[in-house]
Amino acid sequence: MKISPAKENILKRVRNALSQPVQLPFPNSEGNSTVFKVENEGLELKFAEEFTKLQGKFVFCTSKAELIENLRALSENKEWRNLYCQTPSVMKMLRGEELPVLNQSDMHEADAAITDCEYLIARTGTVVLSAAQPSGRVLPVYAPVHIMVAYTHQLVFDLKDAFNKLKEKYGNELPSAVSFATGPSRTADIEKTLVVGIHGPKEVYVFLVDE
């Protein structure tokens, strides 16, 4: 195919420009610092504010005993009969309590799923999950209600901080999948109407335990 003189001129200019790369005008400002104000204190409040803006349900617990009591009250209020859990540390904590927790039955019978998480990102109200967790990839997405148990040491300010923590924790053996859940599943693709719970849980709870 014959190229017109005008097009050839444009391609020539592009080739010349690519052969002479231009340096960044502000090299010291590229990726070295966050553009957001870093808050080292009050991460619990910041996360709670952002998470609830996105229709997430946040519950602060001053102890594990209060966590169990709040889970029991929520379960009774919602009349849940089947709470599914695959996380050993959570199962151990709930063992012997008056909660309808299942760990061997079919997850399709679950009214809600209880899992742990990797980290909580305060700036955006985001929960970081990974395939390395006992709950795997399917459970947090499949369950109609997702309850996450987290601790204050898992709070970080921004996404970059979460990535750094993951690298410190797993080194060169990062999980096969890392996901970021920001509130319940939602979409507005259908006639621009917001629908909650379309691709995942309709309700998402975070129980944050103060250590």
Image (tube, rainbow, N blue to C red):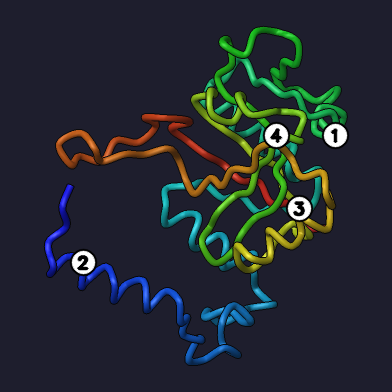
What amino acid does circle 1 point to? Ser
Quadrant occupied by the C terminus: bottom right
- How would you rate the neighbour count of disc 1 (Cα within 10 Å): few for under 14, some for 14-19, many for 20 or more? few
Does 14 appear above or below 101? below
- How would you rate the neighbour count of disc 4 (Cα within 10 Å): few for under 14, some for 14-19, many for 20 or more? some
Q: x%, y% of residue 12?
A: 29, 72
Quadrant housing residue 75: top right
Task: Determine whether label 3 and label 4 are within 8 Å by CB.
Answer: no
Discs 2/3, front:
2
Discs 4/2, front:
2
Q: Is mark 2 on a helix, strand or loop?
A: helix
Question: What residue appears at the point 70 percent right and 8 percent down from the top-left corner?
Answer: 105
What distance separates the C-alpha of mark 4 from that of mark 2? 51 Å
What amino acid does circle 2 point to? Glu
What distance separates the C-alpha of mark 2 from that of mark 1? 66 Å
Does 57 appear above or below 28? above
Q: Which mark, by number, is residue 195?
A: none
Q: Which of marks 1 and 4 is nearer the N terminus?
A: 1
Q: Which mark, by number, is residue 8?
A: 2
- How would you rate the neighbour count of disc 2 (Cα within 10 Å): few for under 14, some for 14-19, many for 20 or more? few
Q: Name the residue under label 1.
A: 89
Q: How many callouts does the rendering have?
A: 4
Q: Which of marks 2 and 3 is nearer the N terminus?
A: 2
What distance separates the C-alpha of mark 1 from that of mark 4? 16 Å
Task: Please state if 182 lies on the left or on the right of 188 as rendered.
Answer: right
What amino acid does circle 4 point to? Ala
Task: Please state if 207 lies on the left or on the right of 29 as rendered.
Answer: right
Quadrant housing residue 33: bottom right
Q: Which mark, by number, is residue 151?
A: 3
Q: Name the residue under label 4.
A: 131
